[in-house]
Image (spheres, rainbow, N blue to C red):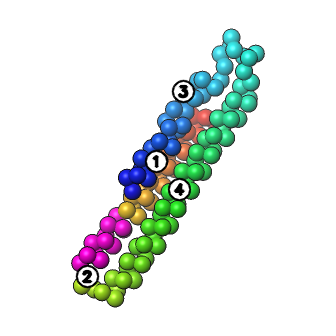
Amino acid sequence: FFLIQELLRVMRTIDDRIVHELNTTIPTASFVGKVDPGQTCKELYESLMDAHTNRERIIKNCISQTSAVVKTLKEEREKAHEDAALLKQLRKEQTKLKLMQSELNVEEVVNDRSWKVLS
């Protein structure tokens, strides 16, 4: 899970630097003729969309995989009620699943913040 969090942190760089990106994308009066602000804004918009889509896909994929593991462990737990190691593994996976689901909420907040700055 910590590797996923680190990957998401790196992938959220564009959102963290959105104000800087806008400031460097939109030309000042002296550069208006040299840079097409419409094209550069479009490219920034597309890269932001791609970043959001990719991060959401990664998070949902992790949630899906962890949910499958939790389901399997629950089924095994029903067969072996007294297996402490199995219960410990189930709790660990359930915690990981909750963390990933909360990461999806964080992603929504990050995305909303970026779109508010961009609009």
Amino acid type of disc 3?
A: His
Counting residues from the N terminus, which is met first, the one under dot 1 or under dot 3?
Answer: 1
Q: Which residues are magenta?
A: 84-95
| Residue at which label 4 appears | 58
Mark 4 is on which residue type? Ile
Number of residue marks? 4
Task: State the SS at label 4.
Answer: helix
- Where residue 76 appears, as percent x and y from the top left, is 36, 83
Label 4 neighbour load within 10 Å: few <14, some 14-19, many 20+: some
Circles 1, 3 touching at the beta carbon (< 8 Å): no
The residue that label 2 is drawn on is: 83
Residue at the spot x=56%, y=56% of the render?
Answer: 57
Q: Of marks 2 and 4, which one's residue comes earlier in the chain?
A: 4
Q: Quadrant of the N terminus?
A: bottom left
The span from disc 1 to disc 2 (Cα, nearest Å) is: 34 Å
Residue type of the residue flagged with mark 1: Leu
The residue at which mark 1 appears reads as 7
Residue 28 picture location, percent across and down: 65, 16
